[in-house]
Image (tube, coloured by chain):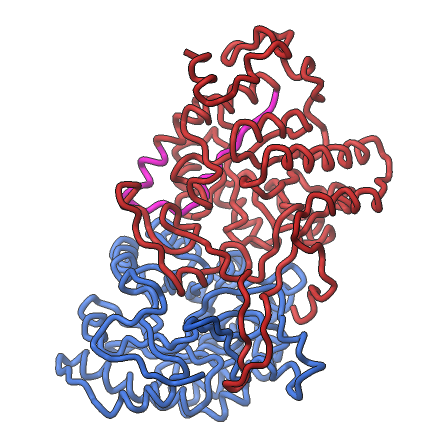
Chain colours: A red, B blue
Amino acid sequence: MTHRLTEQLGLTWLLKPAIPGYGLVKASPLYTAKSWGIGVPKECAMLLAPAGNLEAAKQAFQAGADAVYVGLSGWSRGGARGEFDRAQLRLCIELAHALGKKVQLAANIIPKPQERQQLLRQLAELADWGLHAVILNDVGFLREVRRKLPGLAITASIGCGALNTSDALFYQDLGATAVVLPGYVEPQEIAAVKAKASIQIEIMLRMVQEFIQLGKCWMPSYLNFAAAEQGYRSKRLGGSVKRGGVGSCFRICEQPWTLLKDGVEADRRLLPSRQISQVAELGAFLDAGVDVIKIQGRSLSAEMVGAIIRMYRSAADAWKRGQKSDQKADQNADQKTNGNRAALPAMWTVQGR
Amino acid sequence: MGAFELNTTISNLRNLRESDLSAYDAVYLGNIYCRIFEDNFLERLDDLEEGIALVKGQGLRAYVTSYAAPRNDVLPKVQKALETAAAAGADAIEVHNLGVLRMVHEQFPGMPAHVGGFANVYTDAGAEVLKEYGAVRFTPNYEISLDEVGAITSGVGMPAELVVHGKMPLGVSDYCFLLEYEQKWPEKCPTLCQKNLFLKQGDWAMRSVGKGVLSGKDVCMLEHLPALIAAGHTVFRIEAAYETPEYRLNIAKIYRAALERAAAGDWAEDESAWNTIREHTAVGLCNGFYFGRTGAEYVGKRPQPALAC
């Protein structure tokens, strides 16, 4: 059964001699993390990688991720691309456990009232499978999951829009295990949060900072409301991506706009955005007490996930050994993973905040 | 409160003094997007104190809003604004950030909290949590429908505040790209964002206010007021933070009269009102997301005013 499913999913690497006898449910102790050359879990912050498919999860684990976060079909921002079905998710959890790693589920849409019980049942089952944590976006559902599934760790998604110490305390009150802050929050801000809050602080150190803050944008649905898809979760809401299913983001912020002043064309421009990657500053964030280092990008290729995680793993390990990182080398390595997106344009400042 | 409340937003003392508020029941004071908006009430606490007195002196309720996305360095200023609001007798605090809601709940337990549109109230479960933190009303996330709003209000027993006219918020940013134009244009911060600035692409338009983006079209629910009243809604907002005093007054007079007719069960449309609405509309009208459609669409009998921005 396991082999059939593995072949069906194109995961024949699980059956190759490199991991002879590897069992998905009962892994031989000979073929656990150590036999893959993967380090034991680190004492410093957890390194949390995105995985849009099983190959990406494998690459992330091999590169040194402590955990991956994945989407479950129909329940995560971003739609079908980059989501797992139940069988794939179970395989991923079993793989992670065999390696001493963890899996988190991004269930970061806002379920409609009539969907909450369905999602709760799914989460209960996934918790039984050994899911480590669920990433949620709605404060009401977050509290309901806390009450109904007390053993499941909960992360308040970056879409919740938390930015400050009081936000962290709010999600701590609700029973969240961790709260995600965006990667443009500075180390001293993290330290200030950690000084007052016991909730784990997760920071998305590699992310695209779009013009509008994550979780606070409904420009796409103002201009084009996605029609309900026929035959696929037709009861799903429309609107922005956080509404899931038919919610869509068509990168309205990355298209050219004409800026009119008093009705006259003043400029043609893109709204500002930038690729943030703080690997060169990782030590400062770890010094500040960050608990989880998160990398954005369930749509990234497996190879790219592996390359990024290796870079962050290396920097984190250097910090753990008390070594100063080579910031120039880190920045150069970082640039290679940025694709076509410019890194850190000088115009982006916090002035006027 | 009477049968309904009609309110609006004013960012600074100059705008407050220039505005005729006779058609309103309440005013939100402050600008939620930017700390350096011209003399923002939330930064000029003496002005805030005076503003609250001016509003209350006219027999209106004075609410104080708060920043949509404050980081740690802003919280001390938020704290001072809350203290000023409480001491000056503000009737409620509007909160868009849940951390600020927690601050109000912990430190000003008697102060009613109005949950703003950036707090992302999408469901009854979410509203229920915020109610436990002292929320007494909420602005639903702008992209949910009236049916969904109704499910929340009936399920939680908390009234919704609905934007019935004006440019609805579409997003908030950490960055003001208008600052890039200070060297090129005669206009400078902090009044630059109050200019008539639109982002256009084909027939799409959005209003830029620097650190925020608003709908290009004006939400207009005038012809749907009887349905809103019949559905039990009682709190209505004319979103006019970046509009002129003339807009603030003339639109409010139309809605005040229409709401009174709707509440009395004596509904009749005033044809002259539509000319006034057209005069104050740059790129047309829309219904937002109230009818489960694209936010820029208009659902109703009235044609779009074909005006250029």
Q: Residue furthest left?
A: B266
The structure residue drawn at horizontal position 40% and vertical position 40%, both measured from the top left corner, is: A75
User: Nearest the camera: A71 or B79?
Assistant: A71
Q: Is residue B244 magenta?
A: no
Relative height, residue B103 to residue A168 (above, below): below
* The C terminus of chain B - image quarter: bottom left
User: Nearest the camera: B208 or A190?
Assistant: B208
* The N terminus of chain B - image quarter: bottom left
The structure residue drawn at horizontal position 52% and vertical position 76%, both measured from the top left corner, is: B30
- Bounds of the magenta span? A100-120
Q: Position of residue A301 (x, y in %)?
A: 59, 36
The structure residue drawn at horizontal position 60% and vertical position 33%, both measured from the top left corner, is: A302
Q: Would you say A65 lies left or right of B107 here? A: right
Q: Position of residue A54 (x, y in %)?
A: 53, 27
Q: Is residue A102 magenta?
A: yes
Relative height, residue A51 to residue A142 (above, below): above
Q: Position of residue A2 (x, y in %)?
A: 45, 13
The structure residue drawn at horizontal position 62% and vertical position 41%, both measured from the top left corner, is: A295
Q: Would you say A200 lies left or right of B64 here? A: right
Q: Position of residue B33 (x, y in %)?
A: 55, 70
The quadrant holding residue A84 is: top left
Relative height, residue B15 to residue A83 (above, below): below
Q: Would you say A230 lies left or right of A249 here? A: left
Relative height, residue A96 to residue B149 (above, below): above
